[in-house]
Image (spheres, helix red, strand yellow):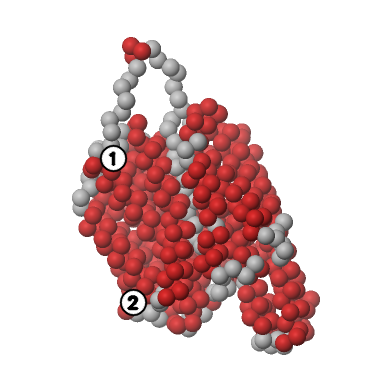
Amino acid sequence: MCETDGSVTIPTVSFLVPAFPSVRKAPVSDSTATTAPPRMTRAQIRLLAVACSAVAVVIATMASLNTALPDIAVETGATQAQLTWIVDGYTLALAALLLPAGALGDRLGRRGVMIVGLIVFAAGSLLPLVADAPLWIIGARAVAGVGASLVMPSTLSLITAGFVEAHRARVIGIWAGVAGSGAVLGMILSGLVLEYASWRVIFGGSAAIALLLVALSFTIDSSRSTQPLPFDFGGGILVVLAVGLFVLGVMEGPHRGWTDVVTLGSMIAGLAAAAGFVLVELRSKAPLLDVRLFRQRAFGVGAAGLSFQYLAGFGLFFLIVQYLQLVLGYSPLRASLALTPIFLVVMGLSLAVPALLARVGIRILLSVGLALIGVALILMGLLDADSTYVEVAFALSIAGVGVGICTAPATHAIVTNTPEDQLGVASAVNDATREIGAAIGVAITGSVLAAAYGHGIDPVAPMIPEPARSAVQDSLAAAIQVAEQAGPQGEQLAELAQNAFLDGLQQASWAVAAILLVGAVISAFWAPRRS
């Protein structure tokens, strides 16, 4: 398949951007005006630094591993399926365990859960240094994903609970900005490491940073629910099955086919478990997640909006990185650097959008933002072999504007419409909707791209001798490698395969663009006018 070729860097990008304050209230008279909020204390600044560093190392490591897949394949003999699971094992464990992990933080203490998560994450990162067989690496990545599921919701809930309302929007924005840039930093650093050292340095470095953060975590304050309730084991099991099985089915769809018994069976079983989870939570006196929160328009549209955004974001990056490397001929490091426009635009907008939220409200920002991401995907579908980087950067910049004006209001809507005692769960909902949307986005773009590429290659496939035929049908990256060894006819084969890939790029981009435009319309009617 096009999307799983080991020689292509597919970054896992976390698209979180700064959240914002609640809508501006009506002016008050001088006699009732409140004083300026107190300045942040050193303890609060230290809390913010540790929490942001923890989420950054989790995201950076997740993204950096994609860059190392070709080297891992060469040194360990991992098959293409094993390479896929080296990435997917982490994502599956992370997505499935987020909600129970967030609830544990609320009940047991968020700092303690984060520390345990960092230790588990470090252990998973260290394991490949002593056991580097493909199956051991897959298992190690799953262990690291378990640790990451404990870290991610704890960091956001710690800083949300650790600051007064006047500072919350600012610190959540800083956290979100770090989370959004962590993936790019991870790809750039991994590219530099691989220029001079082994892929094992990436694992070792991640473990060392995680252990350092464990030590620093003991210097920050913790928080938990004021009236912690018993842990909902039944709901926890059902939500793990629901998210885990559904995401598994979505991941397997592009490889096995959407009608395969494993794909359909996993997705149907996941949906059945989700229905059971809702029924159990509605009857529970101490639910893991109060599903009634989704009745609130702001909370519901925030969760749906994040799913749409990450579906598009991961689909966009899945496609554009392959285009940069396989069509424009960029190196993995150069391709990572080429993605910076979208992050620069997002970070720049973090200063301007709070005023927009107060003036125009969440409805306009969400719907316009989703529409702009859709426009960016339409433009990306128009790229061809003769396109310049300026055209690529233009499409990425428009996507950055869309992400910058709609992702933060969605995150803000989730966090501010959740009771204080359930901040860990709110953070987990924020992360879970992102992971599910990302998995669906990669699955859709991968399936459409693979189908279109195969359709373009099939007419000439019988003329290609085995085993080169299978390689050419598998992906553009493999076709280029075959073409380089095919002599005079290789150039014609490479051009044909490249055109088939570009057809798939256009169809996949426009399919996701259509989904985003539908999401924009839904948000325009569903979202409240104000936050």
Dot 2 lies on which element? helix
The relative height of residue 494 versus residue 452 in the rendered view (above or below) is below
Query: Residue at horizontal 40%, vertical 15%?
Result: 28
Classify 10 Å Cα crowding around label 2: few (below 14), some (14-19), many (20 and above): some
Residue 157 in the figure: left or right of residue 505: left
Q: Nearer the viewer, residue 196 or 220?
A: 196
Q: Nearer the viewer, residue 17 or 441?
A: 17
**Residue 372, numbered circle:** none
The relative height of residue 291 versus residue 313 in the rendered view (above or below) is above
Mark closest to the chain's N terminus, 2 or 1: 2
The amino acid marked with disc number 1 is Gly
Please identify the quarter of the rendering in which residue 124 is found: bottom left
Query: Residue at horizontal 51%, vertical 49%?
Result: 344
Dot 1 lies on which element? loop
> In the image, residue 164 lies at what x, y percent?
31, 33
Badge 2 vs badge 1, beta-carbon distance below 8 Å: no
Q: Nearer the viewer, residue 405 or 411?
A: 405
Please identify the quarter of the rendering in which residue 229 is found: top left
The residue tagged 2 is 129
Query: Residue at horizontal 34%, vertical 35%?
Result: 167
> In the image, residue 200 lies at what x, y percent?
38, 75
The amino acid marked with disc number 2 is Leu
Query: Residue at horizontal 31%, vertical 49%?
Result: 49
